[in-house]
Image (spheres, rainbow, N blue to C red):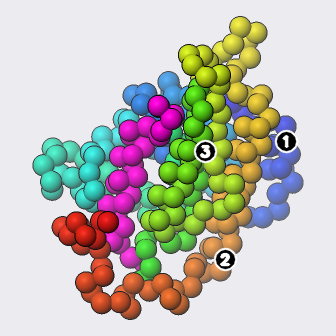
């Protein structure tokens, strides 16, 4: 869907320059093609708000990105013939905003979403120039779709994982849409009256708008402030043994 009238007006009335920000949107749908994904439709609303305000937006459709499962930076060094993650990681490093989109399956995020979280976790030993997690000064949010209850549960898992890695999570940083319990229309499906499921749901569009703008506000604040001060959170100030060691299971606890 395109932005609705409220979302469009908020973009028109904005006076803040966000054109130096970069956003990376992950779609962890199980659908092999992004064009078949219901989650992608709601991510598109987020992307349109970003782009209308000058933010550079990239999408990653995980199901077609050839990302191997695992907790190492490059899984070709651990038995896999190929791994798309190292190239995606370059894009993560450049991004100021990460948005993770996931469908709900059995009340949980998708299996591909777990792979994404694990591969992000694989990079948790990387530090920025201040000795902080390389994820510091990035902000994160979560988009969830499905036709069962579970938006808050999935968002809880994803938001905690992002925050634990070092991303900053703004207020109300999740949004989503669910239909009736059991088999039924998914987000964006055509209904009998010709409308599209969820497109006119004010609760969904309100929360999507609030999340997106809070991501923009916080990313702007962090960049303008030069990032989070490293007083008290400089990992280099601690003994070398505290540095994350991929080969040491105790460091992955």
Q: Residue 104's x, y, as percent? A: 51, 34
Residue 207 in picture, x, y percent from top left: 73, 45
Which residue in the structure is indicated by mark 3?
152
What range of the chain is rendered magenta?
104-128
Residue 75 drawn at (x, y percent): 21, 52
Q: Residue at x 77, y 43 (%)?
A: 206
Q: Pick whichever of labels 1 and 3 is earlier in the sequence.
A: 1
Q: Quadrant of residue 62?
A: top left
Is residue 70 found inside the magenta-colored segment of the image? no
Mark 1 neighbour density, 10 Å: few (under 14) some (14–19) many (20 or more)? few
For mark 3, give the secondary structure.
Answer: helix
Going by the image, does 78 lie left or right of 42?
Answer: left
Mark 1 lies on residue: 6
Residue 41 in sight = no
Q: Residue furthest left?
A: 79
**Which residue is rendered at x = 69% and y = 60% of the image?**
171
Q: Which residue is mark 2?
A: 224
Neighbour class for label 3 at 10 Å: few (<14), some, many (≥20)? some
């Amino acid at each position: 869907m395109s932005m609705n009238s409220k979302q469009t007006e908020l973009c028109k009335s904005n006076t803040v320059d966000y054109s130096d920000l970069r956003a990376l949107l992950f779609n962890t749908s199980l659908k092999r093609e992004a064009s078949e994904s219901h989650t992608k439709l709601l991510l598109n609303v987020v992307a349109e708000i970003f782009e209308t305000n000058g933010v550079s937006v990239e999408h990653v459709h995980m199901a077609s990105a050839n990302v191997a499962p695992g907790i190492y930076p490059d899984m070709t060094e651990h038995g896999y013939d190929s791994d798309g993650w190292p190239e995606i990681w370059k894009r993560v490093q450049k991004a100021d905003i990460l948005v993770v989109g996931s469908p709900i399956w059995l009340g949980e995020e998708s299996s591909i979403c777990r792979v994404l979280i694990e591969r992000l976790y694989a990079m948790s030993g990387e530090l920025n120039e201040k000795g902080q997690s390389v994820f510091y000064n990035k902000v994160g949010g979560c988009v969830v779709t499905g036709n069962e209850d579970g938006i808050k549960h999935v968002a809880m898992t994803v938001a905690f994982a992002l925050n634990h890695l070092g991303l900053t999570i703004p207020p109300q940083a999740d949004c989503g849409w669910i239909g009736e319990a059991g088999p039924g229309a998914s987000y964006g499906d055509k209904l009998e009256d010709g409308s599209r499921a969820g497109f006119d749901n004010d609760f969904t569009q309100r929360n999507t708008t609030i999340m997106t703008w809070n991501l923009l506000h916080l990313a702007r604040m962090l960049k303008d402030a030069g990032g989070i001060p490293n007083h008290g959170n400089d990992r280099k100030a601690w003994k070398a043994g505290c540095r994350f060691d991929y080969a040491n299971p105790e460091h992955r606890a």
